[in-house]
Amino acid sequence: MYYKETQRVPVWFMVLCGMSLFIVTCLEIYGYYFRIVNDIKETIDFHDTTFILLCWMSINLFMLVKYFYLDTLVDDKKIQVRYSILLGPSPPDIALEHIRGLRKVSYSPWRKVGYRLRHSFEGKSCEFCTIRGPQGVLIETNERRLLIGSQHPDQLIAALRDAGVNTESAVACAE
């Protein structure tokens, strides 16, 4: 194995979501106990169903944040991009001998919204495989273009070079 990178959801996003759910849950608990103290009885209670829904959402959000990741693996024959099971099937592996273009790119994740959705990048169809950050490596084969998001794109390109991709001709072809 020449290279392995795992991208996860940023910590600030996990903290923000956790705090938001915590505050809303505390408000619901306060409302529940307020009803008990004031002896308010209702047969169908909106607050109870909301509390149950919040608990369910909290568990699902935790699962999403904990298991929402992207693995990039480079060995001597192929490059693999693997998503967590929550994101569906991963794109097919790319054999290193099929790579004809390769270069480091920067993009706007807010304007090119989505992980693995098909977009155009620089006027051509491109599949995005990214979870966080504005940098990646654009890989071109004869069949497709794949932008793999990376926190360390230079290391990914170096690993592809070590694995046998002729990056000089690949970079020249991509530009």
Image (cartoon, grey):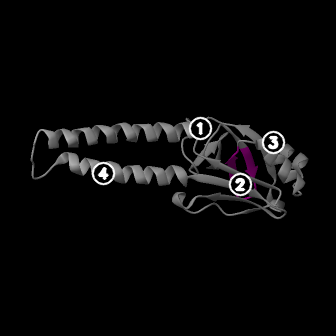
**Mark nearer the N terminus (2 vs 4):** 4
For label 1, count other residues whose C-alpha is less than 10 Å away and answer few (under 14), some (14-19) or many (20+). some
Res. 71 visible in picture: yes
Q: Which residue is mark 3?
A: 154
The correct choice, above or below, for 78 with respect to 6 in the image is: below
- Total numbered badges shown on the rendered structure: 4
Q: Are marks 3 and 4 in contact (CB under 8 Å)?
A: no
Residue 39's spot in the image, x, y percent?
10, 42
For label 2, count other residues whose C-alpha is less than 10 Å away and answer few (under 14), some (14-19) or many (20+). some
Q: CA distance from mark 3 to mark 1?
A: 19 Å
- Nearer the observer: mark 3 or 4; the answer is 4
For label 3, count other residues whose C-alpha is less than 10 Å away and answer few (under 14), some (14-19) or many (20+). some
Q: Quadrant of residue 98?
A: bottom right
Q: Main secondary structure of the magenta part?
A: strand
Q: Which residue is mark 1?
A: 109
User: Which span of residues is magenta-colored?
Assistant: 137-150
**Mark nearer the N terminus (3 vs 1):** 1
User: Does 165 appear in magenta?
Assistant: no
Disc sitting over residue 72 in the figure: 2
